[in-house]
Image (spheres, rainbow, N blue to C red):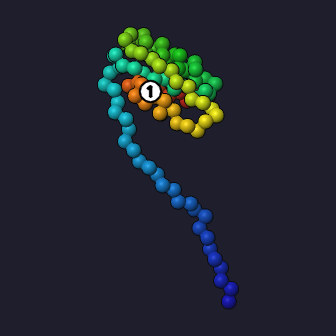
Amino acid sequence: MNKTLVLNPIGRSTVKSFDLSVRLKEFRGKKIGFIDNMKPNAGPFLERVGELFSSRFNDIEITKFRKSLTTNMPIAAEVEGKVDAVVNAWGD
């Protein structure tokens, strides 16, 4: 009698859970980081968001960061401790 070996092709993955960052109650006097992901419309998107932030909150400080397309290094280490909040562009 022949035996048949049945394999299950479904992989197992581990999902890490984490808490969301604390949200700012207001932007006045805060440092806001803008992360440009180098996609075609990310720059114009961040420029416009920056204009809106600056017109509404005249005492904020905006710092721009740019992700590199050639590295897998997280940008979080570059941003951490330098800003109070981040706007991350996903423009295509």
Picture quarter with the N terminus? bottom right
Which percent across, then down, holds residue 2? 68, 85
Outermost residue toward the left? 25
Picture quarter with the C terminus? top right
Which residue lies at the image location 52% right of the left edge and 24% below the top edge?
A: 65
On the picture, is 27 further left or further right than 3? left
On the picture, is 60 further left or further right than 48? left
**Residue bearing mark 1:** 86
As drawn, 71 above or below 39: below
As drawn, 87 above or below 5: above
Secondary structure under tag 1 reads strand
Which residue lies at the image location 62% right of the left edge and 74% below the top edge?
A: 6
Total label count? 1
Neighbour tally class for label 1: few under 14, some 14-19, many 20 plus, Cα within 10 Å? some
On the picture, is 74 further left or further right than 6? left
Which percent across, then down, holds residue 51? 48, 13
Which percent across, then down, holds residue 66? 56, 25
Q: For residue 3, what is the image quadrant?
A: bottom right
Which percent across, then down, holds residue 30? 36, 19
Residue type at mark 1: give it: Val
Which residue lies at the image location 46% right of the left edge and 28% below the top edge?
A: 79
Q: For residue 10, what is the image quadrant?
A: bottom right
Outermost residue toward the bottom? 1
Which residue lies at the image location 63% right of the left edge and 32% below the top edge?
A: 69
As drawn, 80 above or below 55: below
Viewer-nearest residue: 69 or 78: 78
Q: For residue 4, what is the image quadrant?
A: bottom right
As drawn, 38 above or below 44: below
